[in-house]
């Protein structure tokens, strides 16, 4: 067994000091070592996007990265979207829009879609419909709720509050 490495992952503004084997994926470290199980793992080989998190604002597939590669970066996961309970717990605009537009069924893909959409709207707040459809097509929803997901993200884009709660 490879020797474990001591690393710090900065997730949602909090430092997590963890011991991981060099081959441990970021998704496994987030879930198993940081206790942040909102990031789901589906295919484990970069196809489904369920494991999407933001690294320095960019959506990445956390099953395709090693945890050690994320050292020094700012990670954001679905747990960081809503305000902290102490600050009122208000949902992120995307979370509210997903609820309002019935954009989730089983919910397995939802955290990945939320992080993909959050990163996209923060970088491209005026993204056009065709490009948005193209971006969202990179994640899979086994329940096939794509139209409602698209509707929810468009609603947030049109309200101009992609990064807001
Ligand atoms: S679990 Fe990472 S892309 Fe499917
Ligand atoms: S809501 Fe079930 S996989 Fe997308």
Image (cartoon, helix red, strand yellow):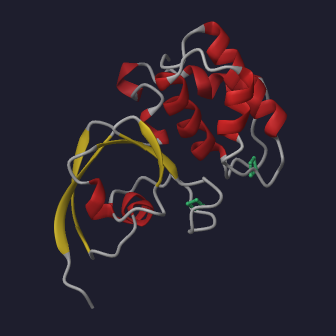
Q: Residue furthest left?
A: 6
Figure disc tally = 0
Q: Nearer the viewer, residue 112 or 107?
A: 112
Q: Does residue 127 appear left or right of residue 21 in this picture?
A: right
Q: Residue furthest top?
A: 159
Residue 91 visible somewhere in the drawing? no
x, y percentage for residue 61? 50, 54
x, y percentage for residue 148? 81, 31
* Residue that appears at 44% across and 43% down: 77
- 163 relative to 28, above or below: above
x, y percentage for residue 12? 33, 38
- 133 relative to 151, above or below: below
- 60 relative to 94, above or below: below
* Ligand 1 rendered quadrant: bottom right
Q: Does residue 82 appear left or right of residue 23 in this picture?
A: right
x, y percentage for residue 27? 44, 61
- 83 relative to 113, above or below: above
Q: Does residue 22 appear left or right of residue 112 in this picture?
A: left
* Residue that appears at 60% across and 53% down: 49
* Residue that appears at 42% across and 35% down: 80
Residue 49 visible somewhere in the drawing? yes
Quadrant position of residue 33: bottom left
Q: Nearer the viewer, residue 39 or 139?
A: 139
Quadrant position of residue 110: top right
Q: Nearer the viewer, residue 3 or 105?
A: 3
Specify the quadrant that holds the N terminus.
bottom left
């Amino acid at each position: 067994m490879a020797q474990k490495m001591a690393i710090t992952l900065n997730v949602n503004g909090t430092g997590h000091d963890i011991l991981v084997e060099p081959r441990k994926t970021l998704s496994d470290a987030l879930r198993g070592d940081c206790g942040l199980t909102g990031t789901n793992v589906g295919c484990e080989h970069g196809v489904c996007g369920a494991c999407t998190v933001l690294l320095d604002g960019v959506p990445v597939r956390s099953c395709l990265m090693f945890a050690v590669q994320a050292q020094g970066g700012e990670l954001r996961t679905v747990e960081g979207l809503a305000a902290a309970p102490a600050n009122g717990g208000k949902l992120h605009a995307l979370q509210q829009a997903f609820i309002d537009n019935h954009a989730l069924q089983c919910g397995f893909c939802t955290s990945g879609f939320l992080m993909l959409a959050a990163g996209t709207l923060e970088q491209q707040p005026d993204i056009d419909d065709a490009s948005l459809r193209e971006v969202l097509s990179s994640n899979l929803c086994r329940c096939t709720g794509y139209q409602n997901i698209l509707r929810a993200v468009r609603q947030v884009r049109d309200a101009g509050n992609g990064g807001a709660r």
